Amino acid sequence: MSQRVAEVASALVYLSMRKRRYTIAAFVETAMPSLSFEFFPPKTAQQREQLDQTVTKLAAFGPDYVSVTFGAGGSTLNYTRETLAHLKHMHGLEVAPHLSCMGGTREEIAALLDDYRAAGYRRLVALRGDLPSGMASPGDFRYAAELVRFVRERTGDHFRIEVAAYPETHPQAADALVDLEHFRAKIAAGADGAITQYFYNPDAYFRFVADVRRLGVSVPIVPGIMPIANFSQLTRFSASCGAEIPRWIAKRMQALGDDAQAIRELGAELVAQLCRQLLEGGAPGLHFYTLNRARPTMAVLERLR
């Protein structure tokens, strides 16, 4: 085990034992990686119960914060607000609401920022988002950089702002260079850091980081991690969001047929291997897309101990 992975393993065990949260600054000072989880807001009592169980299990790993998604055009806003308050007050977690600007007005975003500030939230994940079905106008914001600039103008340095990064290029970008310029614009507008779209080729991440460093971007870029639990579902999801699944991974998964347990085991090992490579290469942390399920993420983290 390399020194970097050993440090990461030690940090995860330490955090799990202490069961407390650390700020980004504390992680930087102690050379520990950051850890965060993404959840989506449940809409039914059964989904809320499942999320509670998931959060209880994952909170034991001592995340810096957890983020909560925001539907297209604010379609899940009430559920998002309820979930944020629940995670903060019932689970004692630092929360980061996703803020999607597509289809929204300056007045709507301003009101939401005021609410989040009053609630004591100190982080945001600022995204362009998708235009809601049936809505013709993008609203007052066309790009995430415009949203970031508006947040800074409205709230100063109150929020730590994370934005999205796409190591394999945003699926709607004209080309990779245009995508890099859009990313640089978000940082120039005032973003503090970035979380990437998930990927399974570590070289894509390292290449992206090298490219933006050459553009003068120095903020932390945390890789987004999608555990592999259901490969068929992952394949469909990846096709829709532009994430590439390396051919060698697809071949190994397909060879397992319908053996769900074997797929979960292999998936956990492959993703843990990816995490090791990323952390060894200097990634500042890991952000897990949990899909509100604990087991796949725990299986990866336990392999990093």
Image: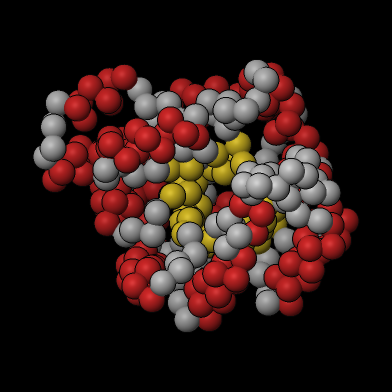
Residue 125's x, y, as percent? 64, 53
Look at 39% across and 59% down and name the residue there: 292
* Residue 249 percent across, percent down from the top left: 28, 26
Q: Residue at x 73, y 61 (%)?
A: 159
Residue 5 shows up from this direction = no
Check the image and report above or below for 68 versus 131: below
**As drawn, is 284 to the left or to the right of 134?**
left
Q: Is residue 65 left or right of residue 297?
A: right
Measuring from the top left, give residue 44's x and y in whole percent.
41, 72
Q: Quadrant of residue 263?
A: top left
Relative height, residue 208 to residue 104 (above, below): above
Residue at the outermost right position? 153
- Give 210 or 140, whichever is nearer the viewer: 140
Q: Looking at the image, which residue is at 37% across and 56% down?
A: 12
- In the current view of this chain or complex, which residue is farthest to the front? 134
> What is the x, y in percent for residue 29?
58, 54
